[in-house]
Amino acid sequence: MKKLLTTLSVFVFIYSFGQTIHSDSQVMTENQKNQDIVVINQLWKDYLASSPDSLYNNPYWNEADKKKHKSYDLLRSEGYMNIYSLGKYGELKNLVLSIKPLDDKYYDIHSMYYWGDFEGYPMVLCTTHVLAFKDTHGRFVLGNWLNYYSKDWKTYREGIITFHYQVYNKSKKKIKKAVKFLAFMKSEFDVNVDSLDIFISNGWKETQRLKGFGYDYGETAISDYTDKGASTDLDNCIIYSNLSEGEYYQHEMMRFVIARYPGVHRLLSDGLSEYYSDDSELRGISHKEHFKHLDDFLSSKKEIDLKNFDSFDSGNLTEKNYLIGMVLVKMIEDKCGHEKLLKALNIVHTDEDLILFLDMEMGIKPDEINSVLRSEITRFASNGFDSKSL
């Protein structure tokens, strides 16, 4: 998914800096028989002009969501597209495609986020679904699609975790692991999660529908857009999982740990997210196979100096950021222990910090980094990566 965000980052800086999202509509508002649609169309336009990426008592959103969620508009914090944040970096526009009743209470606002002409065409980021309904005062307010889409899902609670199932197929073994991992995060990283919701959909596309996305750019831009994808809403303590990973998605749970160390170096962050793993897989492919792809690539590119870490371009042939990060995390933990890893997470933010840490704490001189990392990558390509399971 990071490849998508990198692509988008390049794209949005083409445009001038903007603070609000301008909304147009192709919905008929003049001579409209259903005046609710006219009101809702204006409501949505006003909301997008009201700094939707900022957290405050926004008058256009319903009170129940505000009481339940820290980030009441889940599209703001869902953990994948971050559409409102992207809107800050370019003139992201919104076009209302339709406003239609779902039943006698809810309306569905279906809209498209896009940037202006890109080589003669609009650059479509995504389409979304947001609810509109009347509150107790009889005025229309906005609400999350999640509430409507999952209203018939089965739930099960264990400790502080509530599991939500699109298809109820409870795994006691994975539930036990999820509970155990929360305790591990608290004891080893001082991470406290008061409550956690895990939504288990049939797959990534269903997860996106659950969050309110109708289409997103990743469907055409990412080659490994698979049903194993997931995301985490850190603000609201929600993990969006899938049938494959189920109740225990270690990679996503580790995001709560990574958030504990703001500004930590990207490779330590990525490596840590995969270091604690029971299945030794990344995106459905074994760590060993991933390391073999990276090893083969580096063997054909002797000119690449890994003292510059992941700065080389390997397209989508490798998961270089995760793999190099895994090597670094394992080297620190194996050679220096967990306390030293915690120190690294606190003080290593830049490439220069990482080079200094490897030198001062591990005795790896700058001119040795390339050979050491290449040697470790070759070793894991042959023997597999020894992930640390609980």
Image (spheres, grey):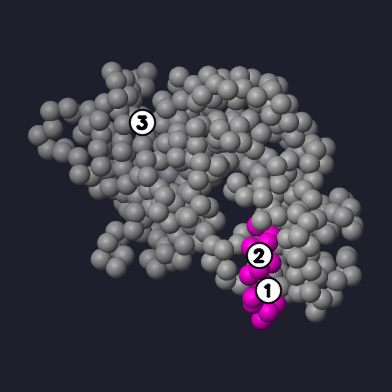
Q: Please, what is the three-letter code of the amino acid marked with disc 1? A: Ser
Q: Nearer the viewer, residue 288 or 12?
A: 288
Mark 2 and mark 3: Cα distance apart in space:
45 Å
Under tag 2, what secondary structure? helix
Which residue is tagged 3? 131
Q: Nearer the viewer, residue 214 or 352?
A: 214
Estimate how packed mark 1 is, as few (under 14), some (14 to 19) or many (20 or more) residues with alpha carbons within 10 Å.
few
> Is 180 part of what is drawn in magenta?
no
Image quadrant assignment for residue 376: bottom right
Q: Residue at x 75, y 54 (%)?
A: 384
Checking the image for residue 299, the label placed there is 1
Checking the image for residue 294, the label placed there is 2
Estimate how packed mark 3 is, as few (under 14), some (14 to 19) or many (20 or more) residues with alpha carbons within 10 Å.
many
**Picture coordinates of residue 83, whole percent (x, y):** 44, 49
**Picture coordinates of residue 321, whole percent (x, y):** 65, 61
Dot placed on the residue nearer the N-terminal end, 2 or 3: 3
Q: In screen coordinates, is 86 left or right of 289?
A: left
